[in-house]
Image (tube, grey):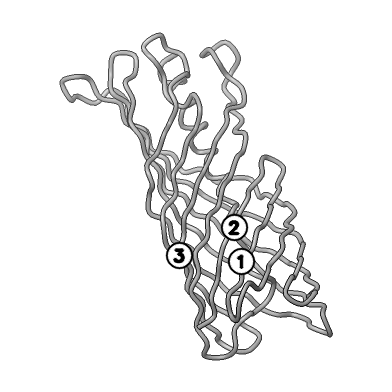
Amino acid sequence: MKKSLAVLAVLVLVAGLSTSAFAERWGKPGANLEKGQWSLGLEYNYVETEIDLRVPQGVVPQLGEEQAVLNQVLVRVGYGLTDKVEAFIKMGGTSTDVSDAFLDPAFNFNQDLEGNLEFTIAGGLKATLYEKDNLRVGAQGQFVYFETDDTADGPGFMQAIDADIWEFEGALLVSYDLGKVTPYAGICMVIGDADVRYRAFTAAGGPVMLYDVDVEQEDWFGMVAGVNCEVMDNVRVGIELTHVSEGVGLSVGVNCAL
């Protein structure tokens, strides 16, 4: 019973990872392409958050908040559907590190999950809702999918965790154009779901524990602030900070209108 609850604790910890992929870069609000125009960009996203591990007291040692870190590298392609609506798709990889995610031979949570760069895809729409003089109000929605997995030696067996994570992210942003520099800020929300699979095998390859868990994260609300700069004709770079109740995300990117 103790071992089963410990494994479920691992699942709760890793499932909490689905709440931390909120660093997808929003960029300058609204549509930034003319109808029929394409854009190509590259972005890097960094997320650092705390995951709460909730298991009945006394069941397993070393419970509490654990740190999760995500790094994403994505290529972005945009297309102007109209002068007010832009569609985009992003593809790349996400690496995931979660401290104390696996059990060690002493039955403690002190082996980290260190995921490799795993497949990531995102896509959505950006729309200009209002624009007058230098002021612009824009809305954006995007779906995100990424994977993570890792293995570790456990108390007498090999452990493996892999997860598929989906999220919908939305934001309402306001910008003010100062010429070549455009600061912006607004609010965002994240709704997500994760399929987490835990597998443990003996040295002979026989299964010890097999768990599949579908976890719906709590809705997250937060704030976004960033600045976008035109460095040459049709080329813009930007930096952005996102903060929600459980963590912070930093994003940088470059985008070129073709």
Which numbered mark, 3 or 1, is in the foreground of this view?
1
User: Where residue 252 appears, x then y in whole percent?
Assistant: 59, 57
The 10 Å Cα crowd at callout 3, few under 14, some 14 to 19, many 20 or more, is some
Mark found first going from the N terminus, 2 or 1? 1
**SS at badge 2:** strand
| Amino acid type assigned to the residue bearing label 1 in the image | Val
Indicate which disc residue 252 carries.
2
Q: Quadrant of the N terminus?
A: top left
Tell me which residue sits at (50%, 59%) in the image. Answer: 144
Q: Mark 3 or mark 2: which is in front?
A: 2
Q: Amino acid at mark 2?
A: Val
Numbered badge on residue 237: 1
Contact between labelled residues 1 and 2, with CB atoms less than 8 Å apart: yes
Q: Identify the residue at image location x=49%, y=64%.
A: 42
Task: Answer left or right for 53 relative to 195.
Answer: right
Secondary structure under tag 1 reads: strand
